[in-house]
Image (tube, rainbow, N blue to C red):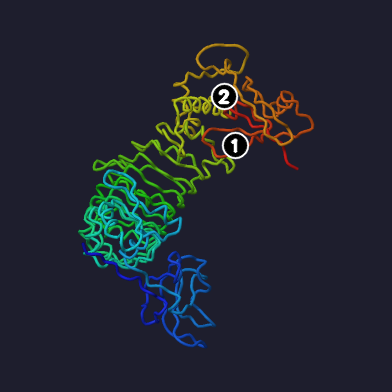
Amino acid sequence: MILAASCLANQSGETAAAFRIRQRVHAAGDPRRTGTIRFIGPISGHDGEWIGVDWDADSGGKHDGMVNGTRYFSTRTSSSGSFVRAKALSAGISFLDAVYKRYRGESTKEEEDEMYVFSTSQRRVSVELVGKDKVEEKLKKFEELLSISVSFMGVSSVDPLCHISTLLPKLKEVDLSGNLLSNWQDIASLCKALPSLQMLDLTSNLMEHEVTEYPSLKNIHLLVLNNCGVTWDVVEKLKVSVPLVAELHLMANELKMIEPTAGPFVQGLNSLRLLNLEANNIDSWDEILKLSHLRSLEELHLNKNKLKTIYYPSSDASCVPFENLQCLLLGRNDIDDVASVDSLNSFPSLVDIRLSENPVADPAKGGVPRFVLIARLSKVKILNGSEISPRERRESEIRYVRLIMAKMQLNNLEEIQRAHPRFVELKALHGIEDEKLQAGGSGPQTLASTLINLTLKCVGPSMGEKQPLTKKLPPSVTVAKLIALCESFFKLKDIKLRLFLEEKGSPLPLPLDDDMATLMELGLGTEATIIIDEELD
């Protein structure tokens, strides 16, 4: 067996001539501090040659490439640039050197967490290499490796390829995140040397935009290009090389537009099941609709973008938009209208939705609580990561109908149906009748027969330890009356109370600040929990 145990380069003796413009580098001794060379040459008033680096981390530099009124280079931000001597930089190491360095045992605890792989029998196998005498023995384990991580190791090249093929013949997964790779041809060459490779993570490698067709990528099933500076044009050029890709992750690439090369919709990517576009700058739903003809797409992650509205497009004879989409993550956008929520019912297969941290899902910002979202979304089974049980759905829908009946004139059905498209359907489904509140009564879900079962919990620091109480109260009780009842139930004198509604699936309790609102108007259903706190001065 040939062992490519090349020596790690000592960068301390490098000169500026050893570097080039646009080269990816890291700070000597710190592979996690990466940047791009933007200038090589003299600086007025200073001896010798200097290298201007635009650091990836905004806090990594001191200026924007201008010193004493002279601009030497441009930077991404106003404080990401700095000048350094050549000895302060490293041009990185090869992929194999990184493998040897990481798995020979001289590592930090953080690295040790990654220093194992799964064998063909899915057994966790240590690959620590200690001393030259044990190299041959340990190499047998290298040959069984299915997964390997050389993240943040300063990898900048992939040669010698023949040695990679010999050392890692069964490798299926490789994590190259946080390195210095940028050339797609290098990536293609690595994949050629690793024909079994199916998962490739290139997170935080600043990749070039020049892309051609690379047949060696044909077996890649999972491709991670988070924070790689890629544009959609790169995706369009790359897709012909990855016909089997089932998961494509494109987080944090500052993507704003999706621009298909042929026609109004993205074509190809026939195996793509999951597309992750989180933490980009997409602000128009029209851009997302360009993905609607991806027939295999089941999961679309759009958290942390700038979307304001959602709508379902009209279908045509050739394609049902988002036909197989089951999961749509929209957390931390700017969606603020319930019409967007209602439009999600039109997606034919959608059952898993995230709307958290949008104005529409935040009652404190004028949005609606979880029970309203559940009632408006007829097919959803998982909301904001929390599964909806049949019981929670039933109670949410009944509570929602009560809320509408309490707040709207029931003789204007046209207005109700326009504002609440599921009202008539849900009212009939649960047998809720249009009756005034009164004592007694019978029949299917009549308001007259409904008492609300409330659990009352004291949490105020001055209240002492008090056991929760469960009380049945009529829906006509106001918040002000409930406060008075809580003072009586728990004997809370001289404490100004504030009530909160605790709901399953909501990160924070909902404050009940409208003293005149009734339990029915708040939409409280049976087995609601009221948190009793005290006002702070």
Vertical side of 290 occupied by 378: above or below = above
- Circle 2 crowding by C-alpha within 10 Å: few under 14, some 14–19, many from 20: some
Q: Which residue is mark 1?
A: 509
Q: Which one is nearer the viewer's eye here, 532 or 124?
A: 124
Who's the residue at 37% across and 46% down the image? 300
Secondary structure found at label 1: loop
Q: Which mark is residue 262?
A: none
- The kind of residue on which mark 2 rests is Glu
| Real-space CA distance between mark 2 and mark 1, rounded to the nearest whole angstrom | 15 Å
Q: Quadrant of residue 463?
A: top right
| Nearest to N terminus: mark 2 or mark 1 | 1
Q: Quadrant of residue 297?
A: top left
Vertical side of 459 occupied by 442: above or below = above
Q: Which mark is residue 527?
A: 2
Image quadrant where one finds the C terminus:
top right
Q: Quadrant of residue 482?
A: top right
